[in-house]
Image (spheres, helix red, strand yellow):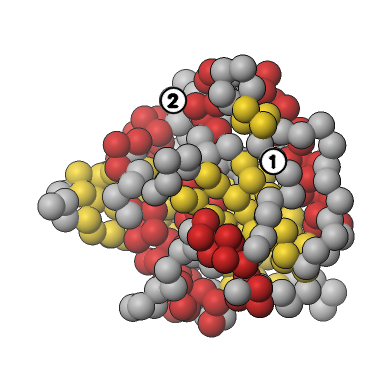
Amino acid sequence: MTNLTIHLIETPEEMTLIEDLQRTIWPDSETDIVPSHMLITAVHNGGLVLGAFADEKLIGFLFGFPGLEGTPDGPRPKHCSHMMGILPDHRDSGAGFALKRAQWQMVRHQGLDHVTWTYDPLLSRNAHLNIAKLGAVCTTYRRAEYGEMRDGVNAGLPSDRFQVDWWINTRRVETRLGKHPRPTLKLDHVNRAGLRPLYALHPSTDNLPCPPEHVPPFEDRLLLAEIPVNFQALKSKDFALARDWRFFTRELFETAFKADYIVTDFIFDTNQGNPRGMYILTHGESTLEDFE
């Protein structure tokens, strides 16, 4: 059984290992690598670099730093969680959750209560971790957040991102990261609630999911928005279809957020013969439990 541990990264020698790890996780674009001297500077000024080790081998890392956000009452401090990466062979090891849990503990110790970060909303595994397991929520869609990205993972499509809000002192987050975390939702939860996705995924000739042509109406307090369960595989197989998904979901989520919907949960159900991933969007104070 793999022995997974999380450690603070603080020395120049360790930062060089983090720099090399980035090149492995995001190949083919040296300009996207955060160099070790920047990581050191951030750590010496309130920032945080964590390493995940499996049997003493570095397999993942997390990098964040203090920031400011604008509010009606003026600037307010927060923590910006800028990067997290796990080696492909270890992405089901629990390393990502362990890194974020360690970050949660350390940022609370700094006296901050708000953490933000971005991720591609079409990546089901990331959505499952960020929204379902960590308890982050989202009301912000950022078009082409990082401009043109050239690494092997992101190249070719607009770098649209969700910016999520992680309110780390709330009961919502504590019930997910505590000793007895809330079980993540499965399809049978929404089936019992009688909920249906906003749209159906119609298989194309090569059995790939196709987005509908138009954004559906938002009429209920609780909505389901399904996305491809493996967007990177879809992109490799049918780039044009992946691009269609990017532009469809851009319009979908921008419209939802303008109508005061919030992304509050995610279902990533791989136990069925047909794996599926779908966002739960709520309006007002509605939750899935209201419908069960």
Q: In this rendered view, identify the residue nearer to me: 73 or 214.
A: 214
Q: Residue at x 61, y 17 (%)?
A: 205
131 displayed left or right of 222: left
57 displayed left or right of 233: left
How many labels sit on residues?
2
* Circle 1 residue: 200
Q: Which of the 4 image quarters holds residue 155?
A: top right
216 displayed left or right of 244: right
Q: Residue at x 40, y 73 (%)?
A: 181
Q: Amino acid at mark 2?
A: Pro
Q: In this rendered view, identify the residue nearer to me: 133 or 198.
A: 198
Q: Residue at x 24, y 51 (%)?
A: 53
Q: In this rendered view, identify the residue nearer to me: 79 or 183.
A: 183
Q: Residue at x 30, y 42 (%)?
A: 90
Task: Please state the horizontal and vertical placement of residue 60, each as a whole percent of the image.
Answer: 34, 46
Q: Is residue 22 above or below residue 235?
A: below
Residue 27's tag is 2
Query: Crowdedness of circle 1 by 10 Å Cα count: few (<14), some, many (20+)?
Result: few
Task: Please state the horizontal and vertical placement of residue 142, each as a whole percent of the image.
Answer: 74, 46
Label 1 vs 2, first from the N-terminus? 2
Circle 1 — which element?
loop
Circle 2 — which element?
loop
Task: Please state the horizontal and vertical placement of residue 260, each as a whole percent of the image.
Answer: 83, 64
On-image quarter of the C terminus:
bottom right
Query: Crowdedness of circle 2 by 10 Å Cα count: few (<14), some, many (20+)?
Result: some
Q: Nearer the viewer, mark 1 or mark 2?
A: 1
Q: Which of the 4 image quarters holds residue 18?
A: top left
Q: CA distance from mark 1 to mark 2?
A: 35 Å
Residue 188's tag is none
Can residue 277 be seen from the camera position used here?
yes
Q: Is residue 42 above or below residue 153?
A: below
Q: Amino acid at mark 1?
A: Ala
